[in-house]
């Protein structure tokens, strides 16, 4: 037992040191240098209201996004539906399903999409529109597995397929997420969580919209003006992100609970930042949440987050229904409203 505890502590220390050394290895922000940036949009109204400080709190179906190791502690099946009216009139939707499978572990399935709606096609000659419309969108499908290695330590993995489309162009990639969660004896059972997201292949747009035509030699009269060729586009890395967080119950009684959480993030396309959040809960039926997103991040539009959660059993059933709402302030980009509905069965 002592060897197990020492192994867990050693693993946590190595993970923390690896995070710190990686976080300090590169001081260039690299903003705008990755593909599939929709993967950086946090999932779940509860997590959003907590300012995104959720890697050590994720013990519901939204953990499939934040920390797949968190689903190992779930005791019943759960499905979560999430919808957010995102920036610039885009919409983010998510569906997650978690199925505990006894001694085998826990399985999870997730689907995420970003919808930008239809937009008019414009050209230099027809700047008011050609009468055609095009659309752009992103999606990710994930399959997760997690299990408890001890009564305090869990680990999980997600394999996912990612696809982006715009008109007649598309790109795809595959990626892996990994996460761990460790419950300590310190400070009312403080939990340490860590995850790495979107470790995978590069993305490159391809399709018929790269095909164009050019004259062989513009200096010679009568040369062919319709020689076809394709524009070769660059490949882009996925938005790799490393998260390390802690959470604990500052106060807990039979009816009331106050939980605080802090996360540190190191993405490969921006500087390091921190998220903080708190949740005040009454009998786990009503929760009031607040937080702050992207602390210490240069030129950040992140800010204050607020939210509410309601948890009750369905009539004539033991199924638990949870409804969550979050408000996120993005400064000049205005606010974002998100909603989640979860059912445990």
Image (cartoon, helix red, strand yellow):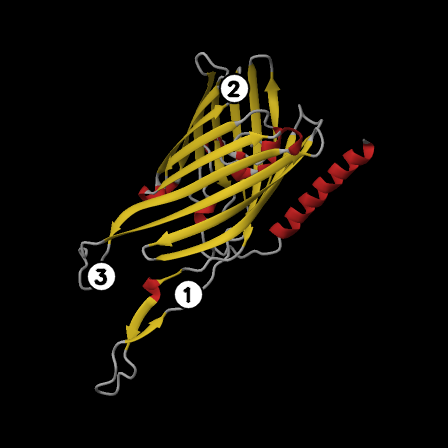
Which numbered dot is residue 123?
3
**What's the residue at 47%, 16% (across, down)?**
313
- Classify 10 Å Cα crowding around label 2: few (below 14), some (14-19), many (20 and above): many
Q: Nearer the viewer, mark 2 or mark 1?
A: 1
Q: Is residue 333 above or below residue 212?
A: above
Q: Secondary structure at mark 1?
A: loop
Relative to residue 43, is residue 251 drawn left or right?
A: right
- Classify 10 Å Cα crowding around label 3: few (below 14), some (14-19), many (20 and above): few
Which quarter of the picture shows residue 300? Answer: top left
Q: Is residue 38 above or below residue 106?
A: below
Relative to residue 194, is residue 14 drawn left or right?
A: right
Seen as rendered, the residue at the extreme right is 2
Which numbered dot is residue 281?
2
Where is residue 78? Give x, y as percent.
Answer: 51, 27
- Quick check: marks 2 and 3 in contact, CB under 8 Å? no
- Quick check: marks 3 and 1 in contact, CB under 8 Å? no
**What's the residue at 38%, 36% (across, down)?**
84
Upstream in the sequence, badge 2 or badge 1? 1
**What's the residue at 55%, 15% (across, down)?**
256
Relative to residue 288, is residue 262 drawn left or right?
A: right
In the foreground, 20 or 132: 132
Residue at the disc numbered 1 = 233
In the foreground, 81 or 195: 81
């Amino acid at each position: 037992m002592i060897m197990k505890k020492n192994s867990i502590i050693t693993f946590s220390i190595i993970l923390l040191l690896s995070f710190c050394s990686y976080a300090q290895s590169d001081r260039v922000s690299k903003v705008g240098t990755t593909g599939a940036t929709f993967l950086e949009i946090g999932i779940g109204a509860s997590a959003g209201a907590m300012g995104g400080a959720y890697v050590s709190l994720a013990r519901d179906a939204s953990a499939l996004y934040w920390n797949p190791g968190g689903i190992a502690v779930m005791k019943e099946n759960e499905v979560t539906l999430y919808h957010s009216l995102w920036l610039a009139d885009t919409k983010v939707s998510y569906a997650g399903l978690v199925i505990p499978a006894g001694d085998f572990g826990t399985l999870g399935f997730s689907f995420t999409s970003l919808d930008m709606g239809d937009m008019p096609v414009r050209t230099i000659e027809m700047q008011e529109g050609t009468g055609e419309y095009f659309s752009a969108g992103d999606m990710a499908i994930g399959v997760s597995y997690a299990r408890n290695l001890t009564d305090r330590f869990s680990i999980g993995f997600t394999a996912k397929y990612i696809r982006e489309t715009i008109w007649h162009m598309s790109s795809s990639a595959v990626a892996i997420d990994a996460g761990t969660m460790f419950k300590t004896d310190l400070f009312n059972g403080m939990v340490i969580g860590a995850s790495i997201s979107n470790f995978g292949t590069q993305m490159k747009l391809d399709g018929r919209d790269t095909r164009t035509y050019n004259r062989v030699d513009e200096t010679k009269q009568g040369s062919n003006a319709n020689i076809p060729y394709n524009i070769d586009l660059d490949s882009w890395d996925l938005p790799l992100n490393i998260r390390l967080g802690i959470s604990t119950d500052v106060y807990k009684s039979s009816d009331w609970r106050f939980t605080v959480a802090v996360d540190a993030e190191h993405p490969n396309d921006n500087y390091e930042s921190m998220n903080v959040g708190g949740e005040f809960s009454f009998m786990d039926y009503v929760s009031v949440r607040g937080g702050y997103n992207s602390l210490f991040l240069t030129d950040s539009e992140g800010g204050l987050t607020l939210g509410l959660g309601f948890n009750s059993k369905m009539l004539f059933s033991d199924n638990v229904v949870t409804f969550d709402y979050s408000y996120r302030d993005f400064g000049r980009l205005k606010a974002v409203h998100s909603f989640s509905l979860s059912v445990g069965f």
